[in-house]
Image: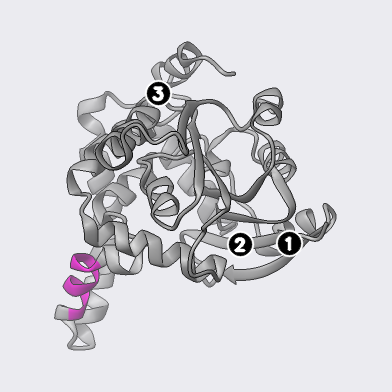
């Protein structure tokens, strides 16, 4: 298993974003409405009403919200994350809602550690949303998660879309963000994102729909899996390491590993993640 010390060294050198610190702040916003949105998003993409009798592996559990959602749906859950603060967040959610429940296990671990994954076994559902492109070895991680899926099991992943030159520019922004002193990062993030948000607001203003713009932000959690607009923004700007992929690359990668695509939601070639649900054929 990759050590917490290695993680700290990466953060200190500017080679990794402190995802767990961001998730720790997000937990203060978590309520039943956000949990319900997370549950609904799992049900929709996995095309299920519940996960009773299913095993669920949450790779890079972050805040723990989707481990909690899977548990609410009846799954037996194992959650792990490389970031120590993310592990602490997930443990906190387990303490709040399922303290003492032995059917939800929370660990520290790395998806790049094949020996660790082998010890966990195979799962009916393997879930990793917006994580594998932050490992620093995305294609290795994509192969490792495939090995964790049980026969006829499902793999639900989300990966940053390849925008060509724009993705290269975002890579530079993320590198700069993580090299900055901590007190300057929120200012830098605001300066980077403000022009984009201003453009969106002006578009709505020209269309005489300014209220629609503000409604989109206020109701962000209802359209974004129960997440937070501000903390997702920080996660996006700071999220490093950073790799991207095209939908067809991911399709071909898993087709060659005996998976078939059963659900796809793209970001229409723009900023954000493409979501995939694959099923192992045998």
First in residue order: circle 3 vs circle 2: 3
State which region is magenta: 212-219
Contact between marks 1 and 2 (CB within 8 A): the answer is yes
Contact between marks 1 and 3 (CB within 8 A): the answer is no
Residue 160, given in percent of the width and then of the height, sits at 54, 53
Give the side of residue 172 with respect to residue 26, left or right. right
Task: Write the residue at 55% across / 49% down.
Answer: 127
Q: Which mark is residue 251?
A: 1
| Kind of element beneath mark 2 | strand
Magenta stretch, main secondary structure, is: helix
From where the camera sits, is residue 267 visible?
no
| Kind of element beneath mark 1 | helix
Residue 88 in the image: above or below residue 3:
below
Label 1 vs label 3, nearer the camera: 3
Give the side of residue 145 with respect to residue 239, left or right. right
Q: Quadrant of the C terminus?
A: bottom right
From where the camera sits, is residue 29 visible?
yes
Q: Check residue 145 for magenta coloring.
A: no
User: How far apart are the two marked residues, 3 and 2, measured between alpha carbons?
Assistant: 27 Å
In which image quadrant can residue 94 be found? top left
First in residue order: circle 1 vs circle 3: 3
Give the side of residue 272 with respect to residue 211, left or right. right
- Mark 3 surroundings: few (<14), some (14-19) or many (≥20) residues within 10 A: many
Q: Which residue is mark 2?
A: 276
Residue 27, given in percent of the width and then of the height, sits at 24, 42
Q: Which mark is residue 84?
A: 3
First in residue order: circle 1 vs circle 2: 1
| Kind of element beneath mark 3 | helix
């Amino acid at each position: 298993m990759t050590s917490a010390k290695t993680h700290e060294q990466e953060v200190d050198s500017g080679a990794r974003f402190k995802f767990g610190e961001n998730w720790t702040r997000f937990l203060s916003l978590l309520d039943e409405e956000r949990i319900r949105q997370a549950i609904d998003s799992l049900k929709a993409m996995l095309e299920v009403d519940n996960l009773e009798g299913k095993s669920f592996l949450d790779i890079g559990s972050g805040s723990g919200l989707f481990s909690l959602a899977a548990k609410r749906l009846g799954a037996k859950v194992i959650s792990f994350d490389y970031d120590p603060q993310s592990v602490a967040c997930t443990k906190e959610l387990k303490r709040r809602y399922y303290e003492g429940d032995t059917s939800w296990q929370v660990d520290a671990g790395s998806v790049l550690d094949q020996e660790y994954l082998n010890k966990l076994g195979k799962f009916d559902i393997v879930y990793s949303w917006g994580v594998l492109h932050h490992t620093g070895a995305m294609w290795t991680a994509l192969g490792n998660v495939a090995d964790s899926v049980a026969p006829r099991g499902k793999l639900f992943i989300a990966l940053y879309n390849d925008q060509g030159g724009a993705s290269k520019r975002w890579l530079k922004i993320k590198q700069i963000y993580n090299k900055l002193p901590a007190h300057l990062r929120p200012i830098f993030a605001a300066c980077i994102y403000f022009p984009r948000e201003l453009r969106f607001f002006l578009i709505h203003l020209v269309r005489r729909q300014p209220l629609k713009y503000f409604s989109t932000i206020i109701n962000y959690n209802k359209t974004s899996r129960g997440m937070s607009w501000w903390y997702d923004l920080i996660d996006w700007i700071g999220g490093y390491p950073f790799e991207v992929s095209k939908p067809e690359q991911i399709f071909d990668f898993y087709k060659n590993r005996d998976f078939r695509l059963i659900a796809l939601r793209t970001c229409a070639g723009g900023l954000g993640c493409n979501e995939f649900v694959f099923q192992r054929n045998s």
